[in-house]
Image (cartoon, rainbow, N blue to C red):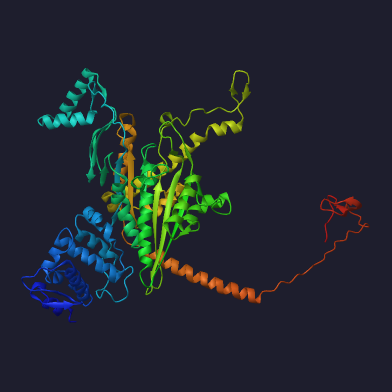
Amino acid sequence: GGGAGLVSSLSDFRGFDFELDGLEGGGDDEELTLPSLLTINIVLRHVLSFLPWSQRGADLLTVSTDFLGDAPHASGDAAYWSFMCQHLSEGAGVYFAAEAAADLADQRGSMRNLFLELWPLRRVFAPPGLFSEPPEEAEAPPIRLQAMMRFRPGKHGPVVDTTNMALPFHQRLNILKSEQPELSHVQAMQIVMKEQAESGKSELPAQILGVTPGPNGSALTMSPGTGLRTFNLDHVFPSTTTQADIFASTGLPTAWEFLNGTNGAVIVYGQTGSGKTHTMFGPPPPVQPAQRGLAGNVADFILNGVEERRRTPGFHCSLAVSFVEVFGQDVSDLLSDKSIGVNKSQMKRMGHRFVLTGRVEHSVTNADELEALLKAGDERKRQAATLMNERSSRAHTLLIFRLRQQASHMAEEKESMLILADLGGSEKLTKSGANEGVKGPGAIDAGGEEEVGRVTWDEYYKSRERVTETTNINKGLLVLKRCVYALRDATSQANQKRRQKLRVPFYDSMLTQLLEPALGGPSRTVILVCASQEPEHAEETVGTLRFGEAVRLVERSGETDNVSKAVKVAVAAIDAEVKEIEVLIKEKEHWVTRTTKKKNVVSTMDTGGTQLAAEEEMDLGGKGAVIFGKKDDIRI
């Protein structure tokens, strides 16, 4: 109750003489040294412990403006809000990485914005009674999928000559009407149609005309049927972007919230050869620290956070990892030689549940264990060389982290999941060369000059391996696009007015079943689309940009699924009851064997058509077959 009065009495530390642990300071003519500032820091933290959080804002700013200005931070405002973040971490158990806070604060615009982002997480691990104010009853703000783009390094090539090419009809019409507003729509159409007939120019090819990098960046493109088009994304990374920059903008925020109990995902999407695997896992070993991909940087950040959590008194924390590969409708565990499920049928039906519920995960305690697991999984991945990529992933790869945290005062542990997905690249057979060497069954294979033979079915299927891989990859990506477009349409205002529930086809593909928590649930999801600026790949790049733009329009509810939590509690109660009944059954059960003998006798004196062949062997063994007549009554 005296906290507010204590704060008002310490309105100016420079006019206040104090002595603490042998450190003296104060007076108008003395400067506070760094040890004295640290001492004031300790005093302020003690003061804060007596104040409700509603008074830890403007009241604290009146304590000492000199302290805030002289603190070892970029500015007084940053020092204050960094101080608040640290106190929120110590009091409520919110994870706060001081070393990485500057990067996140720059992305959010200020340290204050970072604090406001951590504030809604204050009740996850906070002890009861820490926050006297009742929980907010307002709905959580919606969560929007983030779409970012990275252009791979490479030769951009010369811009295609557009001298004998023209914009699409609708864009030329709009340009003419803007230049000559007095023309009617019909008159403008007549003029454009006449110019098109006289010029004989062909339609413009697909091109990437310009890129505006940075947050809220854009790409200006030109494509047949569309003409000039600008695509806006949350962040555009130029070809000179480093792996550390990618991690700071995509992996770091997601991993930070993962440590605070929020589900997250980073999904890498794009054309084959566009740098997806390089972005996610880095180049082939040996790898320099600066070349590590998202997976390695995210893993290090998570392991450091888990180690810090474990050092907290009364805090239990466990980390597990799954590494799976999706090939068509099959899902395989890259960390084990065992199949998922008891058979292939169960794997196709229930494989995604085995993965998402942690049935195939492995516990991890340090970086060496995780590195060994990832190395073993990488050796089992499907990879092959194509014309577009010497190290092409021939399936979709998902690395899943699962974190379970529980403070001593919590009744149940808090579980969060982070998915890092390296999707197989969409590709055209004519460009990737995956269809080269395909043989027809029964065809003549000359082989050498002397040996001639027919192609067997084994040789036929062997020659189609690359084509089969391409088909399975493209099928999963097609369903993923359909899911994103359905989520986008459900978000649109027109559909919300109709209040029509749209079906999202998650269960049309094994890949989308595994990604359903990231796409449709309360998860912080970033989709990083990779592309190239070469003119020969411009058409695929435009398609990738369309997908990224659709992702950016998807919004989900930010509220957690309370129904699922209630179901978990009910299922746990049922499981406990089943175990009790099983124990009672084992105590009371006993096995009894009963043998019943039955004998059917057919008299040989019967006058009907029934006959007994005493020496004839019966089908089921033994002698004495009975032959029934057509009109004989059968009596047993």
Q: Is residue 63 left or right of residue 437?
A: left
At which x and y percent is residue 437? Answer: 51, 27
- Number of residue marks: 0
For residue 341, which quarter of the picture? bottom right
Quarter of the picture containing the N terminus is bottom left
At which x and y percent is residue 483? Answer: 38, 47
Q: Residue at position x 13%, y 72% from top?
A: 63
Residue nearest the observer in this picture, 577 or 65: 65
Quarter of the picture containing the C terminus is bottom right
At which x and y percent is residue 227? Answer: 25, 31
For residue 601, which quarter of the picture? bottom right
Farthest residue, direction left: 29
Residue nearest the observer in this picture, 474 or 268: 268
Q: Residue at position x 31%, y 68% from top?
A: 93
Q: Is residue 519 left or right of residue 66?
A: right
At which x and y percent is residue 184? Answer: 14, 30
Farthest residue, direction bottom: 1
- Residue 612, compared with residue 562, is above or below; it is above
- Residue 202, compared with residue 552, is above or below; it is above
Query: Can residue 85 be seen by looking at this rendering?
Result: yes
Query: Can residue 520 be seen by looking at this rendering?
Result: no
Q: Is residue 384 left or right of residue 61?
A: right
Farthest residue, direction front: 22
- Residue 233, compared with residue 126, is above or below; it is above
